[in-house]
């Protein structure tokens, strides 16, 4: 027996369809009405999603470059005592993730910005570690990355009022990111502290200005996000 409403197959003797609940006892299994309605109302066939060969090829190339550089670095490590392969691996994966992030249709612009920020920060930290660990990545580069994200999110939130909930959520994340950078700057190994302090001050002033000059819906959303 085929349900004339949703098109699923039902065991003989059932009075109701277990999926849509339609009463089918009054229709005989060989009736023309049943066959016509079942054909017209059948669910569409599921189409399997084809794999993205371009992204797969880029990921494969990234893995090949990483493995080859790691192998060559292992063979020549006794001569230079430098783990340059970690820099190569970080750089190629950074390029791969950048391509994947900005060609993906799944991520929103805020998620793309934050994902790009963390991969950029990871690359800067690796370079900092391999060049002597002077903490310039934490004291200079990453705070300015935070300022850039806050600026872009502010412009998006001010210009696109339809997605104000999304942008205020990411603005909240950017604000707490600047707070984390400020806390890290209080440790003695961070010698240049003013970029982290400037990033936090900029985030505070940005949220405050956005609250003052934005529309009512955005103000209400900012109140909820920042518990005002």
Image (cartoon, rainbow, N blue to C red):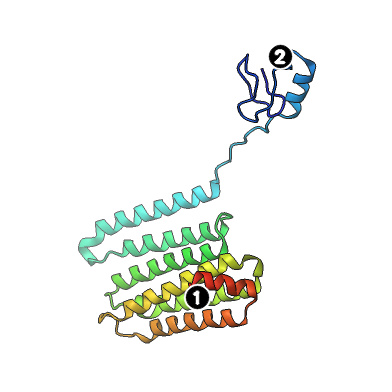
> Going by the image, does 85 lie left or right of 35?
left
Q: Quadrant of residue 107?
A: bottom right
Nearest the eye: 186 or 100: 186
* Residue 192 percent location from the top left of the image: 33, 85
Of the image marks 1 and 2, the number of the one nearer the N terminus: 2
Crowding near the residue tagged with mark 2, few <14, some 14–19, many ≥20 C-alpha atoms within 10 Å: some
Q: Quadrant of residue 81?
A: bottom left
Residue lying at 46% horizontally and 69% vertically, measured from the top left: 173
Nearest the eye: 80 or 171: 171
* Residue 104 percent location from the top left of the image: 56, 55
* Residue 123 percent location from the top left of the image: 39, 67
Q: Secondary structure at mark 1?
A: loop
Q: Which residue is mark 1?
A: 228
> Going by the image, does 43 lie left or right of 91?
right
Residue lying at 35% horizontally and 65% vertically, measured from the top left: 87
Q: Secondary structure at mark 2?
A: loop
Crowding near the residue tagged with mark 1, few <14, some 14–19, many ≥20 C-alpha atoms within 10 Å: few
For the N terminus, the quadrant is: top right
Labelled disc at residue 127: none
Q: Which residue is mark 2?
A: 29
State the separation of the CA atoms marked 1 and 2. 64 Å
Q: Quadrant of residue 120?
A: bottom left
* Residue 193 percent location from the top left of the image: 34, 85
């Amino acid at each position: 027996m085929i349900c004339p409403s949703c098109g699923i197959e039902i065991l003989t003797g059932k009075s109701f369809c277990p999926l849509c609940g339609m009463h089918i006892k009054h229709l005989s299994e060989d009736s023309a009405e049943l066959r016509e309605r079942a054909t017209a109302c059948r669910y569409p066939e599921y189409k399997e999603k084809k794999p993205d060969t371009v992204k797969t090829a880029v990921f494969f190339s990234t893995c090949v470059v990483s493995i080859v550089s790691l192998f060559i670095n292992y063979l020549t490590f006794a001569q230079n005592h430098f783990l340059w392969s970690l820099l190569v691996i970080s750089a190629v994966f950074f390029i791969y993730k950048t391509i994947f992030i900005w060609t993906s249709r799944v991520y929103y612009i805020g998620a793309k910005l934050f994902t790009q920020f963390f991969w950029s920060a990871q690359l800067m930290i690796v370079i900092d570690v391999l060049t002597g660990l002077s903490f310039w990545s934490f004291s200079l580069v990453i705070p300015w990355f935070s300022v850039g994200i806050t600026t872009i999110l502010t412009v998006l939130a001010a210009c696109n009022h339809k997605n104000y909930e999304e942008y205020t959520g990411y603005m909240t994340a950017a604000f707490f990111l600047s707070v984390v950078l400020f806390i890290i700057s209080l440790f003695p190994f961070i010698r240049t502290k003013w970029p982290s302090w400037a990033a936090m001050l900029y985030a505070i002033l940005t949220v405050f200005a956005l609250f003052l000059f934005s529309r009512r819906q955005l103000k209400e959303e900012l109140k909820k996000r920042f518990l005002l």
